[in-house]
Amino acid sequence: MERWYVVHTQPRAEPLAIINLRNQGLETYLPRHLKRRRHARRTEWLPTPLFPAYLFVRFDVEQTRWRAIFSTFGVRYLICNGELPAPVPIGIVEDIRSCENDAGIVIVSKETPFDKG
């Protein structure tokens, strides 16, 4: 059964990791959100990873040569629990995808359940 797993990438190497993982026949997902960047009195809204240096990859542990992920360019490691990859709880990736707009950008709520301090 295919499940989603988390891959830790090298810093700012998410696009490189995605290309190389897709070349191995794996489905990937990198959620992005808009981040404000100020430079030289200009403000820009840039799509950036929602979870920097992390992305999701989908495969079947029984059918896929998943150990090849460890030697993929752009990848540091696959999040594991002991010897096997740790699957993301069912519905998490789908919930994140449901918050995307038409451009594929995750709309992040400004409300936070935490107080400062």
Image (spheres, grey):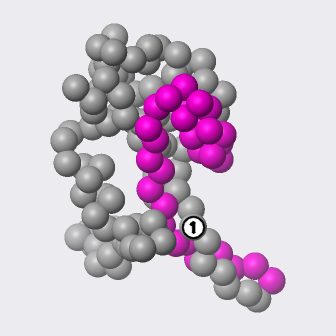
Q: Residue at x 52, y 16 (%)?
A: 68
User: Measured along the vertical axis of the image, is residue 68 above or below residue 111?
Assistant: above
Side of 40 relative to 56 (left or right):
right
Horizontally, residue 15 falls left or right of residue 67, namely: right
> In this view of the protein, can residue 63 be seen by the observer?
yes
| Residue extending furthest toward the left | 90
Q: How crowded is mark 1: few (under 14 residues within 10 Å), some or many (20 or more)?
A: some
Q: In this view, does 117 lie to the left or right of 90?
A: right
Q: In which quarter of the image is the C terminus?
A: bottom left
Q: What stretch is highlighted in magenta?
A: 12-40
Residue at 60%, 18% (x, y): give it.
71
Q: In this view, does 75 lie above or below 115?
A: above
Query: Where residue 28 sits: x, y (%)?
Result: 46, 41
- Residue at 31% across, 67% down: 99
Image-based side of 46 in relation to 5, left or right: right
- Asked if residue 68 is positioned above or below residue 91 in the image, the reply reads above
Picture layout, residue 61 above or below residue 47 = above
Amino acid type, callout 1 = Pro
Toward the viewer: 111 or 30? Answer: 30
Q: Mark 1 points at which residue?
A: 47
Tell me, yes or no, whether the highlighted magenta stretch contains residue 33. yes
Farthest residue in the top direction? Answer: 83
Pick the front one: 10 or 116: 10
Quadrant of res 115: bottom left
Viewer-side residue, 116 vs 32 = 32
Q: Residue furthest right?
A: 40
Residue 22 position, x and y percent, is 54, 35
Residue 41 occupies quadrant: bottom right
The image position of residue 97, as x and y in percent, is: 33, 59
Residue 104 lies in the magenta-colored region: no
Q: Can residue 75 be seen in this view?
A: no
